[in-house]
């Protein structure tokens, strides 16, 4: 989920920066009427996906640590 978010952020920012740098393609030319807003929206969705993905990974890690619990070494 995090990698998908990073990809969306890169595509969103790239779709804004590349035309500003004078680099165009047929795909970017077809999106010209809705730029830069489409790039901003795609980057924002990607950022939200990254944030939720990080939160999910942190909660899974925390659950795994809690499930292990303290070890009782008195039985050794």
Image (cartoon, grey):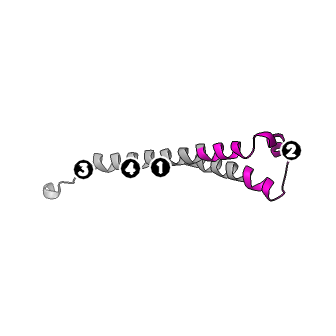
**Label 2 vs label 3, nearer the camera:** 2
Q: Are marks 2 and 3 in contact (CB under 8 Å)?
A: no
Left or right of residue 64: residue 12: right
For marks 1 and 4, give the CA distance. Answer: 11 Å
Residue 60 in the magenta stretch? The answer is no
Q: Which mark is residue 69?
A: 3
- Dot 2 corresponds to which residue? 26
Q: Is there any visible trace of residue 1 in the rendered image?
A: no
For marks 2 and 3, give the CA distance. Answer: 57 Å
> Image point 21% across, 54% down: which residue?
71
**In this picture, which residue range is highlighted in magenta?**
15-44
The numbered mark, 2 or 4, whose residue comes first in the sequence reads: 2
> Image point 17% across, 57% down: which residue?
73
Residue 5 in the image: state x and y as whole percent: 59, 47
Question: Helix, strand or loop at disc 4?
Answer: helix
The numbered mark, 2 or 3, whose residue comes first in the sequence reads: 2
């Amino acid at each position: 989920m995090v990698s998908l978010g990073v990809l969306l952020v890169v595509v969103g920012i790239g779709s804004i920066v590349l035309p500003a740098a004078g680099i165009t393609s047929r795909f970017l030319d077809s999106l010209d009427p809705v730029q830069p807003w489409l790039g901003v929206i795609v980057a924002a969705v990607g950022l939200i996906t990254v944030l939720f993905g990080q939160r999910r990974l942190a909660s899974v890690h925390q659950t795994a640590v809690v499930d292990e619990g303290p070890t009782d070494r008195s039985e050794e």
